[in-house]
Image: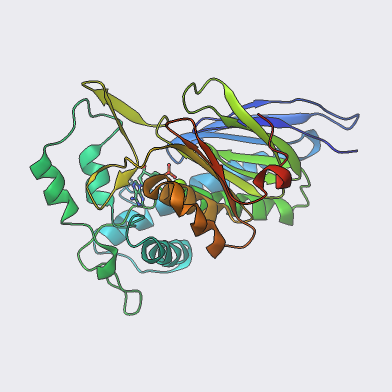
Amino acid sequence: MKKILSIIIMCFVIFTFSSCTNESKNITRQTFALDTVINITTNEKDSEKINDAFALLRGYENVFSRTKPESKLYLLNNGQGKLNGDIEKVLSFSLEMSRLTNGAFDVTVAPLVDLWNIKERKTPPTAEEIETARSKTGYEDITLSPFSLGGKAIDMGAVAKGYIADKVAESFKEKDVENAVIDLGGNVVLIGEFNVGIRNPFNPNEVFATITVKDKSAVTSGAYQRYFEYEGKRYHHIIDPRTGYPSESGVASVTVISPSSMQADALSTAIFILGKDSISLCDNFTDTDALIIMENGEVITTENFDKKYELKK
Ligand code: AMP
Ligand code: MG
C-alpha cells in the first residue's frame, strides 16, 4: 500500500502526516545545523539512522560554513587549504551555473551577501557601499586548474544545502531506508512518494498548492524566507549581482523539482533572480521542473507540470 506524507516546503518546513498505513509509525527528528532548522523523517524502524544523518550534517558544517574558521570553505577563502572533495564538486557545478546564467547566479557573491547581512541589518547599505562590494565579485576570475580564486571569495549558500541533502539521501539508501523526508530548511529530498505542500509566499502559514513527488528533491526559493523591511520596501536574501541589490524580477517564489537536490537548489535561486522567462533553464537538466508564483499572483510552470505532479490548488 502507498504511504503518503504531507509536508509544507519553505525555509522552515512543517510536517503533518496525512495518512499512515498499518505499517509502523513515522518519526520526525529536528535539529539546528547549517544555519537552519533540519527535520528528518523516517519509518520508526529506521529512526536510529537519523542520528547518523545528523552527524553527517555536522561534518558538512566543517566543509561549507563561511564563518567557521576551521571550515574548508573558510580556509579556501583565506588563501589556505586545497581544492578537493566536496568543495571541488560544488565549486565546479557552481561555476557551470554561473556561466549558464551569465552571472545572475554568481558563486563569488560573498562580498554582497556580507554587506547586505540580511539577518542583522535594519537599513539598506549606501549605493557607494554596494558598488564597492559589487566590484569585488566576478566568477570569471576563478580557475580550477590551476586552482585560483582570483582574489574573489565564494559563497555556497545557494547550493550547498542541496548537495548535502543529496548526500544524506545517498547514505540512507545505502542503509536500505525506503521512506524518508530529508528537509534542510526547505531544501527537501524525498525517498519514496509523498504529498508536498508548496507554501503560499503571500501568507507563509498557508499552503498554496499540493503536489505528489516520488524519489526526487523539491526546493523553494522565496522573498519571504529571509528579509528586512525599510520604508515600506522588502529587502531579501537573494542578491542580483548585476545590480548589487536584492533581485526584483517579480517572482514571489519558485519551487524546482529534480532528481538532484544540488541542481534544484541552484536553479531555484537562479530562476528567482532571472524571472519567469528563465524557467527554460530547467531544460538544461534531466527530468527537472519548476513552478513559479509571481508577485502579481500569476503561476507559471514547466510543460505538463500539473499532470506530472498532480498539482492541486
Ligand atoms: P537560496 O535560499 O537557496 O535561494 O539561496 C540564497 C543564498 O544564496 C543566500 O543566502 C546567499 O548565501 C546566496 N546567494 C545570494 N544571492 C546569490 C546569487 N546571485 N548567486 C549565488 N548565490 C547567491
Ligand atoms: Mg538555492
**Is 105 above or below relative to 149?**
above
Report the front residue among 298 and 22: 298
Which residue does the image show at 65% across and 27% down from the upper left? 15
Indicate the quadrant where residue 230 lies. top left
For the rendered model, the colour scheme is: rainbow
Which residue does the image show at 48% across and 30% down from the upper left? 297
Expressed as whole percent of the image width and height from the top left, the position of residue 215 reads 71, 50
**Is 18 above or below relative to 93?**
above
Residue at the limit of the structure toward the left, as seen here: 128
Can you say which quadrant of the picture contains the C terminus?
top right
Expressed as whole percent of the image width and height from the top left, the position of residue 172 reads 70, 50
Expressed as whole percent of the image width and height from the top left, the position of residue 268 reads 48, 47
Which residue does the image show at 28% across and 52% down from the upper left? 109
Direction from residue 275 to residue 262 in the image, left or right = right
Indicate the quadrant where residue 193 lies. top right
Can you say which quadrant of the picture contains the N terminus?
top right
Which residue does the image show at 31% across and 57% down from the upper left? 154
Visible residue check, residue 142: yes
Report the front residue among 112 and 247: 247
Report the front residue among 48 and 310: 310
Expressed as whole percent of the image width and height from the top left, the position of residue 255 reads 54, 42
Direction from residue 169 to residue 122 in the image, left or right = left
